[in-house]
Image (tube, rainbow, N blue to C red):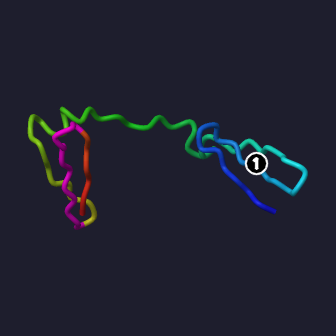
Amino acid sequence: MLETIDTNTNVAASHDMSIATAIRQPTANPSRSNMPVPRIDSRGLLQGNRELVIEHVGLEYRLQVTRNGKLILTK
């Protein structure tokens, strides 16, 4: 049996030579679905800088803004 996942529609399809069956995958973890995800505007976080260091459990991570305005997080 071969299984393919369509990431655009969040549907997994099982193919058994002649039969294709679509199974809807859950879109969110039910235990977390009632909790909103906090949002932080990157401009407020960076405060006009092009990079910053984030300390997390004793490790340092560097958040940088590229020339194209994308974010890169490195360890």
What amino acid type is highlighted by mark number 1? Ala
The percent coordinates of residue 60 (x first, y second) are 20, 62
The residue positioned farthest toward the right in the image shown: 18
Q: Residue at x 24, y 59 (%)?
A: 74
- Figure check: 52 above or below 44: below
The percent coordinates of residue 51 (x first, y second) are 13, 47
Q: Dividing the picture into quarters, in which one does residue 56 lie?
A: bottom left
The percent coordinates of residue 12 (x first, y second) are 71, 48
Report the side of 64 relative to 57 (left or right). Answer: left
Instruction: Report how many numbered discs are placed on residues in the image.
Output: 1
The percent coordinates of residue 27 (x first, y second) are 62, 40
Q: Quadrant of the N terminus?
A: bottom right
Q: Residue at x 43, y 38 (%)?
A: 37
Q: Quadrant of the C terminus?
A: bottom left
Residue located beneath label 1 in the image:
13
Q: Nearer the viewer, residue 27 or 32?
A: 27
Which stretch did the figure color magenta?
A: 58-69
Q: Residue at x 76, y 48 (%)?
A: 13
